[in-house]
Amino acid sequence: MKRANLDLVVGLFVLAGFFSFVYLSVQLGEFSPFSMKRQYQVQAEFGSISGLRRGAVVEIAGVSVGRVARIDLSDRQRALVTMYIDSGVELSEDSIASIKTQGIIGEKYISISPGGSDLLLADGDWLMETESALDLEELVSKYIFGGV
């Protein structure tokens, strides 16, 4: 009888630990299966996305408004980035997407500067104006070897 009680307590403890791990993973991963936001897809082409990863944040004025869903190579040998933007955020067709770095050596993210046009982007539309990532290694090598 004591052995069965001990096994029950250990089993409950392991289950509590497992569910705690799942809860922390969901919270830290910023994923919630219960509160899915409606989003729409926007694409942009960049000359260089050095360091940008799938799942990177898309921001407007420092506020997270979406995520990078896919990164592919376009037919024109440029980086094709597919982003999901929250449906409550309206982007005008002349908005500018730039790849920025959080801090000096932080993660890359996409910053969108809103435009002034009255025409809004819809699901599947393209951001035509882009600014590629700044490559610090290239700048340092130009400075060292006299290319500046």
Image (tube, grey):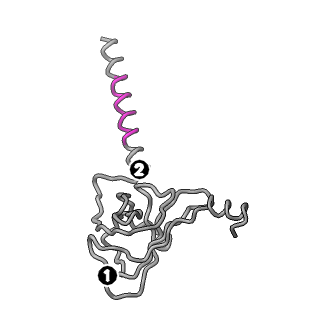
Q: Position of residue 53 (x, y in %)?
A: 44, 55
Q: Which mark is residue 29?
A: 2
Q: How many marks?
A: 2
Q: Are marks 1 and 2 in contact (CB under 8 Å)?
A: no
Dominant SS of magenta comes to helix
> Residue at 29% across / 52% down in the picture?
33
- Relative to 61, is 19 above or below? above
Q: Is residue 50 left or right of residue 65?
A: right
Indicate which label's residue lies in the foreground, 1 or 2: 1
- Relative to 71, is 27 above or below? above
Badge 1: how crowded within 10 Å, few (<14), some, or many (20+)? Answer: some
> Is residue 17 located in the magenta-colored stretch of the structure?
yes
Give the residue type that dot 1 points to.
Leu
Q: Quadrant of the N terminus?
A: top left
Badge 2: how crowded within 10 Å, few (<14), some, or many (20+)? Answer: few
Question: Residue tagged by mark 1?
Answer: 120
> Is residue 81 located in the magenta-colored stretch of the structure?
no
Give the residue type that dot 2 points to.
Gly
Q: Label 2's element?
A: loop
Q: Label 1's element?
A: loop
Q: Is residue 111 left or right of residue 15?
A: right
As measured in the structure, the alpha-carbon distance from the residue carrying label 1 to the one carrying label 2 is 30 Å
> Residue at 37% across / 41% down in the picture?
22
**Residues rendered magenta in the picture:** 9-22
